[in-house]
Amino acid sequence: MSDRAPSPTTTPGAAGNADPERVYERFVADLQEIQALYTRLTELTRDQSRILQQGVSEDLLHLAEAKEREMARLEVIEERMRGTRDVWESVQSRLSEHQKSTVKSLMEAVSQVLKDLVALEEEENRRLLEKREETVQEIRRLDGVRKFQGAYAAAQPPGQPRVLDQKE
């Protein structure tokens, strides 16, 4: 991961003077890194699903921390890319068709990984809501049983047998 600030070739004021090769290389590297991060976040979300199916554990805390780290890395890259995006329009016409095709393919791949990640996160959120509702229903059921038992126990006089011995 590179945490460099935008170079002079990727600042908005330098669009006309930007070196197309440097802009291309930086843009491609950033897109590849974003694709890798989205792929990693997808893997972490799948791990989260597996962990939750087994029951909440300490692993879930580690997984949440890993997701936070990846999201922080993503923010750094996206911030850096803001300058590159500004310059990208002005240098595109000076790139080869192969370079344009490479960027287009990478952008499509990043878009697909992101769509997959969003769909997986939505599915996981749906499962979590279902699990939460099941837990709430179970708590209500247990509370009802407890109240019933409490009411039944209160109806019996203390120290009196609950069953009449008819043998005598």
Image (cartoon, rainbow, N blue to C red):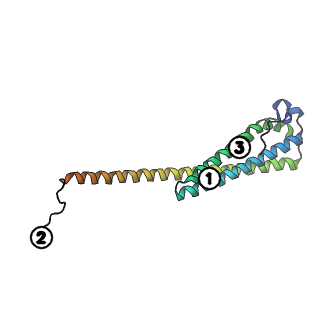
Residue 45 - label:
1
Residue 150 - label:
none
Can you identify the residue that label 2 sits on?
Answer: 167
Residue sitting nearer the eye, 4 or 127 = 4
Residue sitting nearer the eye, 93 or 12 = 12
Residue type highlighted by circle 1: Thr
Percent coordinates x, y for residue 156 in the rendering: 19, 54
In the picture as drawn, the residue positioned furthest to the top comes out as 13
Residue type highlighted by circle 3: Leu
Q: Secondary structure at mark 2?
A: loop
Can you identify the residue that label 3 sits on?
Answer: 74
Residue 136 in view of the camera: yes
Dot 2: few (<14), some (14–19), or many (≥20) neighbours within 10 Å?
few
Residue sitting nearer the eye, 72 or 87 = 72
Q: Alpha carbon of mark 2 to alpha carbon of mark 1: how far? A: 66 Å
Establish if 168 lies above or below 74: below
